[in-house]
Amino acid sequence: MTTSRRGLRVVVIGGGVGGLCLAQGLRKAGLGVSVYERDESVRGRNQGYRLHISPEGERALRECLPERAQALLTATANSRYGYGMAIYDEHLTAQPGPEITDPRAGAADKVDAVDRVTLRRVLLAGLDDAVHFGKRFTRHEQRPDGTVVAHFTDGTTATGDVLIAADGGNSVLRRAVGVQAEPRDLGVRTIFGRIPLVPELRRELPEVLQDRFTWVIGSDGPKLGLMPMAFRTRPAEAAGKLWPGLDLPDSDDYFMSVFSMHRTETGLPDEEFLAMEGERLWRFVQDRTTGWHPALRTVLRYADVAETFPVAVRATAPIELWEPGAVIPIGDAVHAMPPSGGVGANTAVRDAATLTRALLAADRGECSIAEASKRYQAEMFEYATEATATSLQVAKWSLKRIDFDESVLAGKP
């Protein structure tokens, strides 16, 4: 176990991708860190399955992770998939769309997509003593000596010099410090699913539906995204070679499916749609794709019904900066964005790398914690505003209809 070299203590509220990446970066830099997550375990809630990793996101992950965790991330990343995007209508007639390029296209060790559960396990690796599950944050207090105390529902507390709000789009900390920028409902309703790439399905599908991100734009409203996740090395096998003893649950290859439409097209009250569970959700999808190409219908038949859940898509725009001080936001707590474009998680890990550098400067005595917060937020505002705009533009193109006034993107720090 590495201990803090200089004494700065950081308390992180939220053990998602951003919070854990920050914890890894701080630990790697030799700073003291503890993470408090409200879920009871690492797989406590549904948040999707496959994550696109951009070049910027990969750089941030490698900056924060120790070498052994980097090796594990590379070994379990997506393999031969990811060669652009195929766009069709529901009859599999090719449609025009944007060109997607990636400077890493030919790199054998690139990390351009990962399984979310595997990523979270990799981000947890080596942090057993620092991460505490089943901790629901309620409030915080700033003491006269400058320290910050976090309070939890079980009566326990955690004290640090810095308190990180990594508690997501419904951030309790954001509201506690008076930030008004709540994520906006974009009117899009999405059903996330997981479709195992079993041998029978591979045999039935044309290759073009297996080797890239496929986006289907239905003429009557619904849209379907199919994103294959093919592990370079199965997670359990990779852990056995690179990190013996690490608990890394195995997984087969799969499609992540994303079925989307405007809330007015569901035919159901929001409260009913968002309360639906797996079996009913897949019946809903199948009922709305009865006239689609047989190959697409075949994919849907193989869905893992239990691993299905609905989401109301939201975005924070414009981004509102927080008062520079000991409470600092990262990830969805400050800049929630739609999954279109695959930039949300990448922006969160960029936050982690940027904030790690800023806090390390404060720990060396080069600036105050408030100045470190100000520097981090100024840099974050620039790239997160750009990422939010990109994700909204992709959403508008791919979904055709979202409830969003683009004039709000003119917000300034």
Image (cartoon, helix red, strand yellow):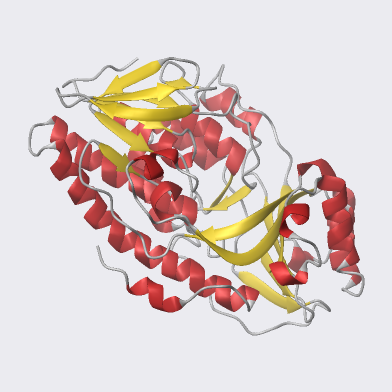
- Horizontal side of 256 relative to 128 (left or right) equals right
Q: Is residue 355 left or right of residue 368?
A: right
Residue 338 locus on image (x, y percent): 54, 61
Which residue: 50% across, 42% down?
74
> Does residue 107 appear in this view?
no
Give above or below for 51 relative to 297. Answer: above
- Name the residue furthest left: 366
Where residue 130 sits in the image (x, y, percent)? 41, 20
Q: Nearer the viewer, residue 141 or 106?
A: 141
Of 59 and 182, the residue lying toward us? 182
- Residue 53 locus on image (x, y percent): 49, 53
For the N terminus, which image quadrant?
top left
Image point (33%, 74%), residue name: 410
Could you tell me which residue is drawn at 9 percent across and 39 percent down?
A: 367
Where residue 263 sits, quadrant-wise, is bottom right
x and y percentages locating residue 91 in the rendered image: 84, 79
